[in-house]
Amino acid sequence: QLTDIAEMDQDAVARVPLQPGRVKWFDKAKGFGFANVFGLPDDVFLHVEVLRRSGLSDLSPGEALAMRVIDGKRGRMAAEVLAWEAALARDEAAQPKTEDD
């Protein structure tokens, strides 16, 4: 899965929509784990290098995430992972202001 990560086109990844998910498990010592996108049964592979690129170092089971999920050579994997709160803050900052704000 490391080759999938190394070969990712960051511009293409940025165009993939963020999806809400939850951590199933993550083993920092092994450097990987899995999550699920809400409403979908498929596991999404999480690699520690993707976490590092996203500014995270560890995840806890049940933790809410926002992920950009791509199809890697071995299945679905997270190309970007954000803490749920960080994703919400980023989304709010990107929203255009209206006269009511």
Image (tube, grey):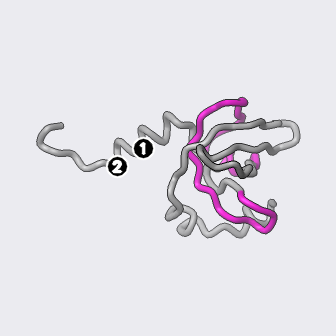
What kind of element bears circle 2? helix
Span shown in magenta: 47-76
Residue lying at 11% horizontally and 42% vertically, measured from the top left = 99
Mark 1 neighbour density, 10 Å: few (under 14) some (14–19) many (20 or more):
few
Residue 22, given in percent of the width and then of the height, sits at: 64, 38
Percent position of residue 53, x then y? 64, 50
| Residue at (88% x, 41% y) in the render | 30
Is any part of residue 49 visible from this angle? no
Check the picture and name the quadrant holding the C terminus: top left
Up-down relation of residue 38 to residue 9 (above or below): above
Q: Residue at x 65, y 39 (%)?
A: 56
Task: Indicate the amino acid at tag 2.
Answer: Ala
Q: Nearer the viewer, residue 76 or 39?
A: 39
Residue 59 in the figure: left or right of residue 31: left
| Vertical position of residue 100 compared to residue 42: above or below | above
Which of the 4 image quarters holds residue 20?
top right
Q: Which residue is mark 1?
A: 90
Total number of numbered discs in the rendering: 2
For the residues bearing labels 1 and 2, Cβ distance under 8 angstroms: yes
- Residue 12 position in % (x across, y down): 55, 69
Q: Secondary structure at mark 1?
A: helix
Q: Is residue 21 magenta?
A: no
Amino acid bearing label 1: Arg
Question: Magenta stretch: residue 62 in it?
Answer: yes
The quarter of the rendered structure image containing the N terminus is: bottom right
Q: What is the x, y in percent for residue 35?
A: 70, 43
Q: CA distance from mark 1 to mark 2?
A: 6 Å
Residue 26 visible at all: yes
State the residue position of label 2: 94
- Crowding near the residue tagged with mark 2, few <14, some 14–19, many ≥20 C-alpha atoms within 10 Å: few
Q: Residue at x 61, y 52 (%)?
A: 80
